[in-house]
Image (tube, rainbow, N blue to C red):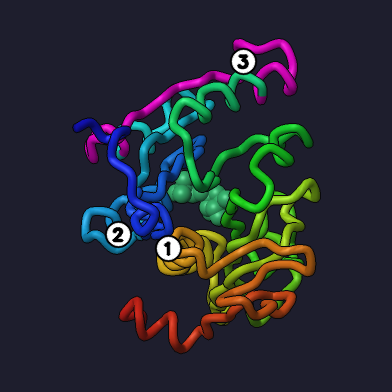
Amino acid sequence: MTDTDYQSDTLRDITPEPSEVRRVVVLISGSGSNLQALIDEQTHDRLGGEIVAVISNEPEAYGLQRARDAGIDAVVLPHREYESRDAYDGALIKVIERHEPDLIVLAGFMRILTPRFVQRYFGRMLNIHPSLLPAYQGLNTHARALADGVAEHGCSVHFVTEELDGGPVVVQAEVAVAADETEESLKAKVHAREHLIYPIAVKWFLEGRLKLEAEGATFDGMPLPPHGLRMSHADAAEELDEE
Ligand code: GRF
């Protein structure tokens, strides 16, 4: 008897539990320290899925080596070889699709994405940004925060929409800006917080707890506040053993 011969109404009524591993593609352009944080969680079986490929537009990105060291497919797709943004994003979609991802994670991918690309992965693409969004969208966030003399800075994980750094925020972590803070010290503190919250957000998504719905981001079916869930400076500092 073959599988197809076998008939059972009872069995056909059963909806099997999704047993497939959820697949993640990470896009990078540089050092990939956030990628490393995700790899570390995966190594300990805590990511809720598997990073199946890392793609970089920069051939020299150190994150590619991190991927190779972890046995993850590392793909270089240099943007300079394409004549337009649209041509590049089209090629990128093709490469990504080969890996059949459930989630796209932008981890320092220094490219402005075309609307076509964003729409393709709408609701299943996350980014991390080094500020407490909506403050300091764009570049040089630490220098701008210091120049403004803010007491509080941080980082945000958000869904990607067509508005640059403007999609619904999922989770943020705060850092208190010290009196003697430099751009470098602030960057290091924010980075450490990024490595805390990004794996958590990715896991929530892969577990189906985090969604992008018509009214915005939801967690366990409840709408998230505009700034998402917040990790305070004190909680993050304790977690990171900061002084
Ligand atoms: C991080 O600061 C992230 O917030 C921004 O790009 C940087 C990437 O750093 N989007 P890394 O390559 O993960 O070390």
Q: Secondary structure at mark 1?
A: helix
Q: Which residue is mark 2?
A: 41
Q: Are marks 2 and 1 in contact (CB under 8 Å)?
A: yes
**Residue 128 falls left or right of residue 31:** right
Q: In front: 153, or 221?
A: 221
Q: Which residue is mark 1?
A: 203
Q: In front: 208, or 195?
A: 208
Residue at the spot x=78%, y=63% of the render?
Answer: 214
Q: Is mark 1 within 8 Å of ligand 1?
A: no
Q: In this rendering, which labeled residue sits more in front, label 2 or label 1?
A: 1
Q: Inspect this view and state whether residue 188 appears.
A: no
Q: Is residue 88 found inside the magenta-colored segment of the image?
A: yes
Which amino acid type is marked by label 2?
Answer: Glu
Residue at the spot x=39%, y=60% of the render?
Answer: 14
Q: Which residue is mark 3?
A: 80
**Residue 228 falls left or right of residue 34:** right
Q: In front: 96, or 62?
A: 96
Residue at the spot x=55%, y=46% of the render?
Answer: 106
Q: Magenta region: which residues?
A: 67-89
Q: Inspect this view and state whether residue 144 appears.
A: yes
